Image: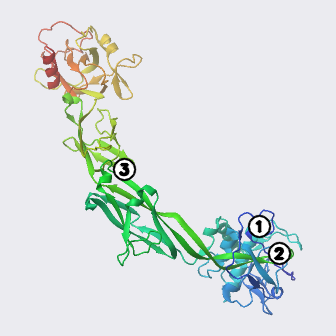
Amino acid sequence: MRVRKRNRLVLLTAVGLTLGGLAFSGGNTGIVYADDNGPQTIRTNNAGKTFVTASSGKLYAQYEGQWKEGYGYHRVNIIKEKGKSGRDSYIFCINWSKESPSNKQLTKQYQANPEVQWLVTDFAKGHDRSFESLDNAGADYDLADYWLYQTAVHLVACPEEVSPIDGKKPGDTLNKFAPQVRDKVLRLVAEAKKHKNESDSEIVLNHATLNFDPSTLNIGSGDMHDNKYEKSFQVKSSEMHDVQVHAADSKNEKYLSGTRKNGSKVDFNNVNADDNLKISVPYSDMTNTSDLSFKVRATGHWNKRAKVAWIYGDNDPNTQHVAKWAVKATTIPMEGDTEMTVHVKPAFGKISFVKKGSGDNNNKLLPGTEFLLTSSGFSERQTVDSNGRVTFDSLPLGKKYHLKEIKQPNGQYNGNYERDIDALDGNNPQKDVDLGTIINDKRHQKFTISKQNINSQGISGAQFVLIRKNWHEPLNVNSTEEAKKQALRQVNGELVTGHSDQQPYIATTDSNGNTVFDNVLINPQDPRYDYYAVEIKSPNGYALSPTPIKYDGIGKTSPDTVSGTMKDTTQPIPTTGSKELLMQSVTGAVVVLTIGSYAYYESKKEK
């Protein structure tokens, strides 16, 4: 656009450009050439006598012979189409380095690129609905916003183009704009650059709809009628014509049927919105499968009308090109864009089982254990109840399932059970699958000790170590130091054998005479072991027990907690306790061994 210098004004020579330079560059990528709709020619006003500037935040214009003096660093010619009024009349310049087209007859050339098109069509929305607007413009908001959007068009279309008058680029004086004006320009530019294709930069005037009601058709055992699984659906459309409905796979075309309102048979090459369409699947087709899925597609043509930006010019290379919005009418084929998925599920199955732990001879209940059952398009969680039972019901037949244990609240047990289940799939799927009892192997064992005096009162301060031996292997420990060498060690919170570089784990009785060895690691694959609780230090006034507590044949099927009691029958004596283990009987001292009912049962059985 032509910009005239005036005293006391530093002005850019503005000749706008659009399309990010595409109007004059050698690579016109992204340009959509005009078709035969919209005005083919436009005539501009006498642009040489009209100017506008608003870079200071206020509107100043020379318009139709009336000039208002004002400061501004960027003036542009007011380009309008003759015979138009309001925002519909404004035309945006394309080239920065060419004169504004004054009293010119211009011909439609091509469609503007998405960024410029968005600026032109957004301006057309109006002052209160456009992305940005200028304040303090008085009554002529349209003229102020026109200057704002024209400035943004320059910066989007030709940021590097140089004016032949003063060598300036479109953005060279942005820093001299009033801050609030400069910010609006930059926000407009940033927003325009987000629009990369025609569809998101145009304004559609008649949105089309083409969809199925429902979008997913689930057919189950309750939809069986006269030996058919049958259910109705409709195709809804607006602004469309030549609507066709077909199965995506031709082999499923036989399942489509329907009637019109007058009772005649539906023509699926010309479907009406009120036609009663049906999916009808003979029961005989479902005998070898429990899940039939296929897609039905609707196609049609949309008579689309949208506001776009056309570029106008002539064959003279010196003539400025301009952008003007108009309505573009096109026919858009909507082929395969609308689908309905049909699921035929004639029956449902159930999977149930009981969850237990290996403790208490495989009778330990593990309530709170969580399982996840998954399959294609299916996922469900269930928690073990107080009776140890889990039930997954309403399961679609015809699927292979995967069962996985995802949470085990009892830390003594492994929580890594999982398996595939295909009993609900195949030619003869089961409807009720009972997996029986699922056993979790024990990982940790708990040992408790009670140290009592002659009056069955607890003795505090007694120290013990725990030793593991092969089943029926003698203990053969003759001193507390030797007991410590063979004792279990604590590693990563677990009591384990080996690790002689670590200190032995020592348990001390509390004020009630009780102590515990918790988290003793057991390998479910290993045989049973004998464990010995050996006293390595007695409290003041008591003798060191000559006989350890033996826990016989402990393994994954033992009770979760096994207990033993050590009873000192001697009268308290003033001693700190011997450091040697007496392996023979001691007069007046008797050690009573008590272990869990399970260990007793095992030992009797072994005998």
Residue 157: quarter of image: bottom right
Residue at x 65% of width, y 78% of height: 123
Q: Earlier in the sequence, mark 2 or mark 1?
A: 2
Nearer the observer, 279 or 322? 279
The amino acid on which the numbered mark 1 sits, given as a three-letter code, is Leu
The amino acid on which the numbered mark 2 sits, given as a three-letter code, is Leu
State if disc 3 and disc 2 touch (CB < 8 Å): no
Left or right of 582 in this view: 81: right
- The residue that mark 1 highlights is 22
Of badges 2 and 1, nearer the viewer stands 1
| Residue farthest left in this picture | 455
| Residue farthest top in this picture | 584
| Residue farthest bottom in this picture | 65
- The residue that mark 2 highlights is 12
Q: Secondary structure at mark 1?
A: loop
Say which quadrant the C terminus sits in.
Answer: top left
- The residue that mark 3 highlights is 378
Q: CA distance from mark 2 to mark 1?
A: 22 Å
Q: Secondary structure at mark 2?
A: loop
Nearer the observer, 491 or 391? 391
Vertical side of 520 occupied by 215: above or below: below
Percent x, y of residue 256? 39, 63
